[in-house]
Every structure is written in C-alpha cells, then in structure tokens.
C-alpha cells in the first residue's frame, strides 16, 4: 500500500519564506530521486478542541507556526533507496547547513510509517 516519511516541526513565522525556499528545493531533490509525492503544509486551523493541538504538541513558542509534512514512497525499501540517493546528492548538504536553518532541527519530530488505509 505504500510507505510515508512524516514530520512535524515548529517554524518561526518570520522564517516561513526561507523555510518555503528550503522545502521547494528539498521537494525537487526527493522527487528527482524517486519519491512519489512530497508535501509541506503550514498550520492554518490549529485551535482544535479535540485531541492535542499541533502547536501544543510541537511546543511551538509565540511567533511560531507548525509545519506538517510527508513524503510518499512505494515501500520501505523504496524509501531507503530514495533517501540514500538524496543523502549522497551534494545539493542536500548545501540545503541543510545546521548554522543556517530556518528552524530548530532538534525540535523536529520524524518517523517512517506503513500506510494502513489509503486510496489507490
């Protein structure tokens, strides 16, 4: 049914333009190396009364919003192959300079997921 890498991270609103540029370049890399889909979504309606709101769970501070993102693959092995290619691509290292990130990498939550339910 597929495999998804997902992540959630708080981003200062003042850094959204820089984050978007980074995300657009990352999306291009993952798609070039075989990812089926790549989405980066910025918080819009985050004041839900059901469950734990994303900003609270992500420990977003004043002036921050939350990014919810995912990358779709055929399978876990496909994900592993694509991610290995991305990590070998020199462009990823210029994108991910720890001294010049528009967000705090230590606050990013990430994981790989088997698709449980999905449309074909």
Image (spheres, rainbow, N blue to C red):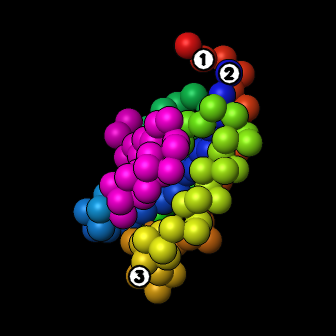
- Residue 1, disc: 2
- Foreground residue, 13 or 18? 18
CA gap, disc 3 to disc 2?
37 Å
Magenta residue check for 40: yes
Q: Is residue 36 left or right of residue 107?
A: left
21 horizontally vs 27: left or right = left
Q: Secondary structure at mark 3?
A: helix
Instruction: Name the spot of residue 81 as percent of width and height, x first.
Output: 66, 50
User: How would you rate the neighbour count of disc 1 (Cα within 10 Å): few for under 14, some for 14-19, many for 20 or more?
Assistant: few
Bounds of the magenta segment = 22-45
Lower position in the chain sequence, tag 2 or tag 1: 2
Disc 2/disc 1 C-alpha distance (Å)? 7 Å
Q: At 52% across and 44% down in the image, what residue appears?
A: 34
| Labelled disc at residue 100 | 3
Mark 3 vs 2: CB contact within 8 A = no
For mark 1, give the secondary structure. Answer: loop
Circle 2 SS class: loop
Where is residue 74? Give x, y as percent. Answer: 63, 32
Q: Quadrant of residue 17?
A: bottom left
114 up-or-down from 65: above or below:
above
Which one is earlier in the sequence, the residue at label 3 or at label 1?
3
Q: Disc 1 marks which residue?
A: 118
Which disc number belongs to residue 11? Answer: none
């Amino acid at each position: 049914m597929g495999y998804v890498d997902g992540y959630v991270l708080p981003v200062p609103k003042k850094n959204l333009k820089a984050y978007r540029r980074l995300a657009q370049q990352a999306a291009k890399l993952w798609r070039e190396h075989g990812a089926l889909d790549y989405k980066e979504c910025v918080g819009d309606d985050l004041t839900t009364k059901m469950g734990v709101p994303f900003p609270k769970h992500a420990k977003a501070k004043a002036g921050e919003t939350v990014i919810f993102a995912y990358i779709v693959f055929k399978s876990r092995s496909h994900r592993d192959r694509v991610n290995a290619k991305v990590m070998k691509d020199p462009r990823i290292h210029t994108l991910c300079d720890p001294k010049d990130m528009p967000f705090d990498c230590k606050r990013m939550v990430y994981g790989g997921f088997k698709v449980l339910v999905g449309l074909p």
